[in-house]
Image (cartoon, rainbow, N blue to C red):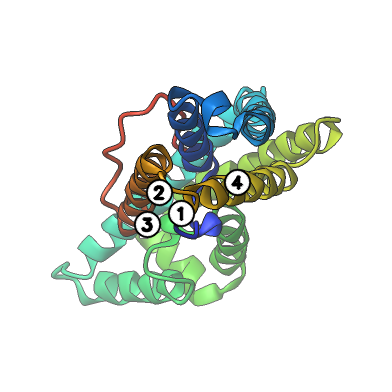
């Protein structure tokens, strides 16, 4: 039997890579002889549709801008936090108190803001910018530590990021090809049909060719599940396919 696939754990590049490799493996197994050529062709067509839209989205005119602005705001908030933390060890107690005030203000939104999702981080930094400007104690602490210009730059970069993010999303929405999630569901449906064909014919002895194909498919699924789990835990990817991984 072909094992069940936990589709939701895969980011788009992993999803495309898995089904591209499954399609390739089935093709190499002589699908006409295995009587799976028709459902396999539908899977291949569905995967190509996902990949085409995915590549177009990755090439959005705003994508590089979104990436660079996200990296810049991450740099700013990380730098501010490190400097503030350093000041908590300062010999002047007034400076230590100011640093602690800022640190508490930042940490109430999470100890690792730069690792939040794009949308969540935008909302968090908006709230933090408001605290920096409206909380008198925090505002005074920032001034004492000479961090006001830095926090102003952070606020503006976050605004610029959100503007670029909205432009990119508008580009996606106006594309007639459809949403990636919808196209992924089509692949899942088509693969389910292919899977049932393979498993049905595998029940007819002798079936060594089908058994071999099932083992290869299961091996691919195991590899991609392991890769997704490593990514989630921060371990990176070791797959050597040519598909994108983000």
Q: Is 137 placed left or right of 85 in the picture?
A: right
**Quadrant in the picture for residue 31:** top right
Give the residue number, with chain letter if any, for mark 1. Answer: 2
Q: Earlier in the sequence, mark 1 or mark 4?
A: 1
Instruction: Find numbered disc 3 in the image and state the secondary structure of the residue it sits on.
Output: helix
Give the residue number, with chain letter if any, for mark 4. Answer: 197
Q: Is 148 placed left or right of 91 in the picture?
A: right
Marks 3 and 4: which is nearer the front? 4
Instruction: Find numbered disc 4 in the image and state the secondary structure of the residue it sits on.
Output: helix
Residue 185 location in percent, x, y?
Answer: 69, 49
Marks 1 and 3: which is nearer the front? 1
Residue 213 location in percent, x, y?
Answer: 40, 39
Q: Earlier in the sequence, mark 4 or mark 2?
A: 4
Rendered image: mark on residue 232: 3
Image point 49% across, 60% down: which residue? 4
Cα gap from disc 1 to disc 3, whole angstroms: 24 Å
Q: Is residue 133 above or below residue 68?
A: below
Instruction: Find numbered disc 2 in the image and state the secondary structure of the residue it sits on.
Output: helix
Q: Earlier in the sequence, mark 2 or mark 1?
A: 1
Does residue 139 appear in this view?
A: yes
Residue 92 location in percent, x, y?
Answer: 19, 71
Cα gap from disc 2 to disc 1, whole angstroms: 9 Å
Marks 2 and 1: which is nearer the front? 1
Q: Nearer the viewer, residue 5 or 184?
A: 5
Image point 51% across, 31% down: which residue? 20
Give the residue number, with chain letter if any, for mark 2. Answer: 221
Marks 4 and 2: which is nearer the front? 4
Q: Is 141 placed left or right of 195 in the picture?
A: left
- Are circles 2 and 1 on residues that touch, CB within 8 Å? yes
Q: Nearer the viewer, residue 38 or 171?
A: 38
Cα gap from disc 3 to disc 2, whole angstroms: 17 Å
């Amino acid at each position: 039997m072909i094992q069940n696939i936990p589709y939701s754990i895969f980011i788009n590049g992993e999803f495309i890579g898995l089904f591209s490799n499954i399609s390739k493996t089935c093709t190499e197994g002589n699908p006409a002889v295995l009587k799976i050529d028709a459902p396999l062709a539908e899977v291949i067509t569905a995967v190509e549709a996902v990949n085409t839209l995915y590549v177009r989205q990755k090439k959005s005119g705003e994508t590089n801008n979104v990436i660079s602005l996200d990296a810049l705001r991450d740099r700013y908030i990380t730098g501010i936090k490190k400097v503030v933390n350093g000041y908590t060890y300062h010999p002047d107690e007034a400076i230590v108190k100011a640093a602690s005030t800022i640190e508490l203000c930042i940490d109430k939104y999470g100890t690792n803001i730069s690792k939040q999702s794009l949308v969540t981080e935008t909302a968090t930094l908006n709230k933090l910018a408001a605290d920096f400007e409206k909380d008198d104690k925090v505002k005074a602490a920032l001034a004492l530590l000479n961090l006001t210009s830095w926090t102003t730059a952070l606020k503006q970069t976050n605004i610029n990021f959100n503007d670029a993010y909205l432009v990119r999303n508008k580009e996606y929405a106006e594309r007639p090809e459809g949403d990636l999630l919808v196209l992924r569901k089509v692949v899942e449906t088509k693969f389910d049909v292919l899977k049932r064909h393979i498993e049905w014919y595998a029940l007819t002895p002798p079936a060594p060719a089908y058994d071999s194909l099932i083992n290869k498919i299961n091996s691919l699924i195991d590899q991609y599940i392991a890769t997704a789990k490593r990514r989630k835990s921060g371990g990176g990817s070791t797959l050597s396919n040519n598909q994108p991984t983000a």
